[in-house]
Amino acid sequence: MNQTAASSAPAADVVEDPYLWLEDVEGEKALDWVRTQNAASKQSLESLPGFGKLRDDLRAILDSDAKIPYVIEMGGHLYNFWQDAQNPRGLWRRTTLDSYSSATPAWEVILDLDALNKAEGENWVWAGAECLRPEYTRCLLSLSRGGADANVTREFDIATRTFIGDGYYRPEAKGGMSWIDADTVFVYTDFGDGSLTSSGYPRIAKRWKRGTELSAAEVVYEGQAGDMYIAAMHDDTPGYERSFVSRTLAFYNDELYVIGADGALSKIDAPNSANKSVRKDWLLLELREPLTEGASTYPAGSLLAAKFDAYMAGERVYTVLFTPSESTSLASYTFTANHLVLNVLEDVKNRLSVLTPAAQAGEAWASTALPGAPAFGTVTVSAFDADTSDKVWLTSTDYLTPSTLSLGELMGEKLKLKEMPAFFDASGYEITQSFATSDDGTRVPYFMVARKGLQANGTNPTLLYGYGGFEISLTPTYSGAVGRAWLQDGGVYVVANIRGGGEYGPRWHQAALKANRNKAYEDFAAVARDLIAKNITAPAHLGMQGGSNGGLLMGNMTVMYPELFGAVVCQVPLLDMKRYHLLLAGASWMAEYGNPETADWEFLQKYSPYQNLKADAKYPPVLFTTSTRDDRVHPGHARKMFARMQAQGHDVDYYENIEGGHGGAADNGQRAYMQAIAYSYLRQHLFPKS
């Protein structure tokens, strides 16, 4: 989709929506409006008490040299992408494991993005790298302008530290490229008119031989315009080399095909709703709906294993690796060379176990607890080299404990290699978990971070954060920004694990889909009311914050429950649910929200904040932030909502970062600024006036 033009709209919509012109993302009239609003907001927001000091402190946190440099192993080196004050766009660099294990690793710079931008007159933002095994010297680097989802792919030679002049190059578009071998890649991108889906993602995947034009690449698979995303990929696991095509019809609705030696495609005949993955001899199915095979029914949220070749031949013999309960869900799983690590959430707390594959299908896999894992907090595990080793990286954190990174044998001791510094004094704080009761009786968990011995006097400035969509779980994570900007001066921080998320697996997500979207908002309101009922805070001191789908949450809570809140920060939001499917990637979310051009509008109109604004309502003050370069959630949502609320006389502020993509910022300076205006705004409205 051309980002510089608004989607076509019927004349009736233009009459109904006088701010439709603000959807013209980079149109001069719209950008002049943005600059005017930014100038006014900068003047008011930057003059808030403590703004400058807070911005600088947050920038120092983001630029800290003591942050953990997370790495991936390739060909005997550990690779890392790093940003700091001297390198705002970042360095792609590498070191050895021995050096990385020391307090001061010796880094070898592979690519300096700031130097590249200067040389090319660009504003490239790092978007990732895929390097060809086993030498790992040729890489496909993805770079985006200003942090947009659309990016370019360029072939890079690590040995010479240069881009290959006549190498692979994919022009700017949403899509990707991946290695098959040294002279062949899969490419899925914008090939010209008709080659994208209605969501603006690739509709066609091709096999491209070196030395030929992109236009001559061979079609591997061609999807439908109404699909969401088509991609192709190659599994280069030694001895198990296979290629696949993924056809994503919608979120959590996909088909997976194996590409045969003759180029023919064979579908993995598993439910579209199941997450399908292939690892060596095994096919794993993570169910989002119940599956009945013969006399057996496996509940949604289960993880099943079957022998891949036998499954493709028609056999349906499963081993159940995980079955959910009322309090548990599968967060993730990770293979090492000889084992499978299951990461289970139990009431939003991680529990890790190690499984050893059985020899035959249908046989139980041996299971034991992962040694060395902490009992509380958020814990993640990733393989050091899943093909050759059972070593794992273990990361642990919580709201008050800086992240630590350990490395060791899966069943052995894990040696702590890195630890993030403490960016605020957490000794006087504690984390508690409570459950609010939603309107339909559902227990909704939430975490609260506050000073020990907090007085329940109804005046504590409290920030409530939420998301509630796309089966994404909010687990305890350390944030120096939250500590410095909110907690250390007496603020209370609360995270609500509302329905629509993944905290209790597919059932928790599906409970708030489409016509049931109100359940997410009722849950969030229940947490707010619980905090007020416990006299932790009061509406005048209770604020809320959320972005993307969480921005839609903010919009609906503002319109539907204005009496509960004293201030709102609404970031990169969806807000116009009548037109969201016409804007950028919006069509890809219809499985989550519904299609407003059908009978779905009957329920969608209840949860479309833009249409439900009222001039005579009393709303809390709202700060809207977005990014011009966000090519996922259209900035027109925030622009139009602000414009309408401003015209109606409500207390609103607006800031649009000209760069940043869906994350809202392209470098640490921008991130610090965006964080500072948000927290300064909340502090101004929620902290008791002295």
Image: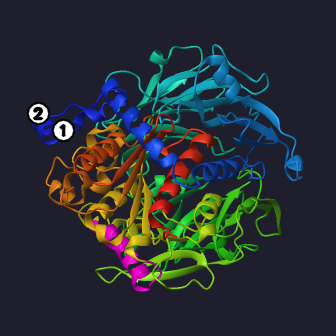
Task: Find numbered disc 2 in the image and state the secondary structure of the residue it sits on.
Answer: helix
Q: Residue at x 66, y 70 (%)?
A: 400
- Residue 487, given in percent of the width and then of the height, sits at 60, 68
Check residue 553 for magenta coloring.
no
Against 629, residue 622 (above or below) is below
Q: Which residue is mark 1?
A: 18
Which amino acid does the dot numbered 1 rest on? Pro
The stretch of residues the image draws in magenta is: 518-537
Considering the whole magenta stretch, tell me its main secondary structure: helix
- Image quadrant assignment for residue 30: top left
Q: Residue at x 47, y 34 (%)?
A: 658
Of residues 201 and 213, the one drawn nearer to the viewer in this rendering = 201
- Taking 117 as reference, is 204 left or right? left
Of residues 405 and 435, the one drawn nearer to the viewer in this rendering = 435
Check residue 523 for magenta coloring.
yes
Mark 1–mark 2 Cα distance, whole angstroms, equals 11 Å
Task: Tell me which label, 1 or 2, sits earlier in the chain.
Answer: 2
Against 670, residue 533 (above or below) is below
Q: Is residue 331 visible?
A: yes
Q: Is residue 323 visible?
A: no
- Image quadrant assignment for residue 26: top left
10 Å neighbourhood of mark 1: few (<14), some, or many (≥20)? few
Please state, as top left, top right, bottom left or bottom right, where the N terminus lies in the image.
Answer: top left
Mark on residue 284?
none
10 Å neighbourhood of mark 2: few (<14), some, or many (≥20)? few
Q: Residue at x 61, y 58 (%)?
A: 481
Mark on residue 11?
2
Task: Find numbered disc 1 in the image and state the secondary structure of the residue it sits on.
Answer: loop
- Residue 226, given in percent of the width and then of the height, sits at 28, 40
Which amino acid does the dot numbered 2 rest on? Ala
